[in-house]
Amino acid sequence: MKLIIAIIKPFKLDDVREALTGVGVTGMTVTEVKGFGRQKGQTEIYRGAEYSTNMVPKIKLEIACPADLVAGAVEAIKSAANTGAIGDGKIFVLDIGQAVRIRTGETDETAL
């Protein structure tokens, strides 16, 4: 079992969700987050005044899936989230030690 964490641009969420559904991903957790990397913030205009923000709005996806789906899921995210511009995001893949479905008590891959 693996946990895929992807940080993407907000307007790419629907494209990424559709791509993941196409490769067999059945669920995910989506969180609105803020952060910065090489993009180093952005300049915005509010009520006629220009100001700089250090944190850029992003979407964080968390996807728990069997190890055999990881390569397809990562490729789907990479393809769907790509704009070719700085700030497209990052993908991280981590091992999951244990998963438990609270309602039924199922564990590991049957809990996903």
Image (cartoon, grey):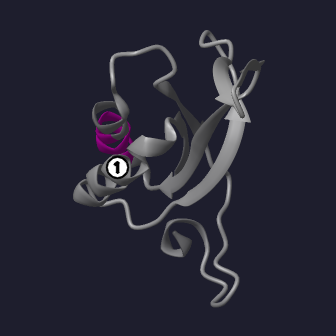
The residue that appears at 30% across and 41% down in the rendered structure is: 76
Residue 111 in the magenta stretch? The answer is: no
- Is 75 on the left or on the right of 87, as rendered? left
Magenta residues span 69-76
Q: Is residue 27 above or below residue 70?
A: below
Q: Position of residue 53 (x, y in %)?
A: 75, 22
Depth order, front residue of 12/104? 12
Q: Which quadrant of the view contains residue 54?
A: top right
| Residue 29 image offset from top left, x and y in percent | 58, 60
Q: Secondary structure at mark 1?
A: helix
- Within 10 Å of disc 1 (Cα), the crowding (few <14, some 14-19, many 20+) is some
Question: What kind of residue is marked 1?
Answer: Leu
Residue 3, image x, y percentages = 57, 47
Is 75 colored magenta in this rendering? yes
- Identify which residue is drawn at 66% across, 89% down: 103
| Residue 83, quarter of the rendered image | top left
Tell which of 65 and 53 is nearer to you: 53
Residue placed under numbered mark 1 in the picture: 69
Residue located 72% across and 34% down the image = 47
The residue under the point 71% across, 32% down is 46
Looking at this view, name the residue that lies furthest to the bottom: 104
Magenta segment, prevailing SS (helix, strand or loop): helix
- Residue 8 versus residue 28: which sits nearer the camera? 8
Q: Position of residue 57 (x, y in %)?
A: 64, 36
Q: Is residue 96 above or below residue 93?
A: below
Does 75 appear above or below 96?
Answer: above
